[in-house]
Image: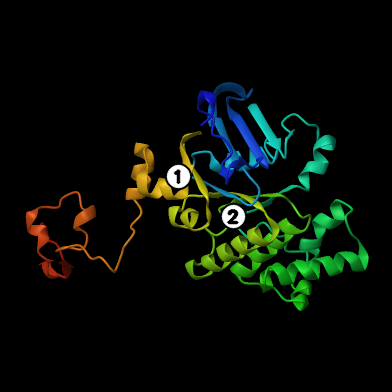
Amino acid sequence: MAEGGRPQASTQGSAAVPPILEVRELKKHFVIQKGILRRAAGHVFAVDGVSFSIRPGETLGLVGESGCGKSTVGRTVLRLVEPTAGSIELDGTDITRLSRAELRPYRRQMQIIFQDPFSSLDPRMSAGEIVGEPLRVHGVASGKERKARVAELFERVGLRKPQMDNYPHQFSGGQRQRIGIARALALEPKLIIADEPVSALDVSIQAQVLNLMMDLQRELGLAYLFISHNLAVVEHISHRIAVMYLGRIVEYTDKKTLFTAALHPYTESLLLAVPVPDPGELPQGCRFRPRCPYAADKCLEDPALREVRPGQLVACHLR
């Protein structure tokens, strides 16, 4: 930690690696308006003094309950939402107060993958047009060059070239998210904000998308800010993790430390709320005993499944 408690960029080996993203004391307060005249009646402190850094090739997991402000952090970093205070440095350049025109070159360096792969894709555009749109908007490629680049992106994310002509409704949820990933990669960014990118997908598909993102990170040196409420997902993909609660980061450390030696009570509560079964080491007696708030000595004996009310069976000594 730096002076004043601000987290520092982590290191590789003995030398510090300069961060691609450095966020300092970031704040975003929303005004609550009431009455016909819409007068200010208070503020929502969605993000209230958040600091962190991400280096090239690294994933910082930002985790917390719904409403804690983590998605607002991601959108504020991208300047999709304007910050109230604080600073955002991208690859050493402070982009916090840049005008739209000044910010445009930096938009190519940071992209976003949205939560819902269906609502984030224009149903009137083909998949190829969606992936190629950033190239058109930024004037990077046109004509055959753009089409070839889009075909390359499709193959990179596990889609086939003929699928470029299909529309979003013709793809599965996992395939639509692959389209979103391909679109995010189109401008060869250095940083990708992934806002709950697998929460809308079936569990069987989530691992495929996460593994794809990890493969792309290794190949391209991408930095991820991975936003999620799912600790199991965050553990799988992250190098370091920041835990948010009501607009502030309450714990910030590497993945191994967080899951084996968490310090903040809120982090401990989050970890306790996630069942982590280990079939190789079953507890003595009742399987649920180590996590049960009512556990007693008799629970060291394995309870039988028995009928306690007509039509209702339970395997518990205490019921």
Residue 57 drawn above or below residue 74: below
Residue 109 or residue 101, whichever sits in front: 109
Q: Are marks 1 and 2 in contact (CB under 8 Å)?
A: no
Which color scheme does this rendered protein use?
rainbow
Q: What residue did someone put label 2 on?
A: 115
Which residue lies at the image location 73% right of the left edge and 58% below the top edge? Answer: 185
Residue 92 occupies which quadrant of the picture? top right
Which residue lies at the image location 75% right of the left edge and 29% below the top edge? Answer: 97
Q: Position of residue 128 (x, y in %)?
A: 79, 67
Residue 90 drawn above or below residue 159: above
Q: Position of residue 190 (x, y in %)?
A: 71, 49
- Residue type at the position of mark 2: Gln
Which residue lies at the image location 16% right of the left edge and 68% below the top edge? Answer: 313
Mark number, residue 217: none
Mark number, residue 65: 1
Whether residue 317 is visible here, answered yes or no, is: no
Query: In what element is the residue under mark 2?
Result: loop
- Residue type at the position of mark 1: Glu
Q: 10 Å neighbourhood of mark 1: few (<14), some, or many (≥20)?
A: some
Q: Residue furthest front?
A: 14
- Determine the CA span between mark 1 and mark 2: 15 Å
Q: 10 Å neighbourhood of mark 2: few (<14), some, or many (≥20)?
A: many
Residue 219 or residue 271, whichever sits in front: 219
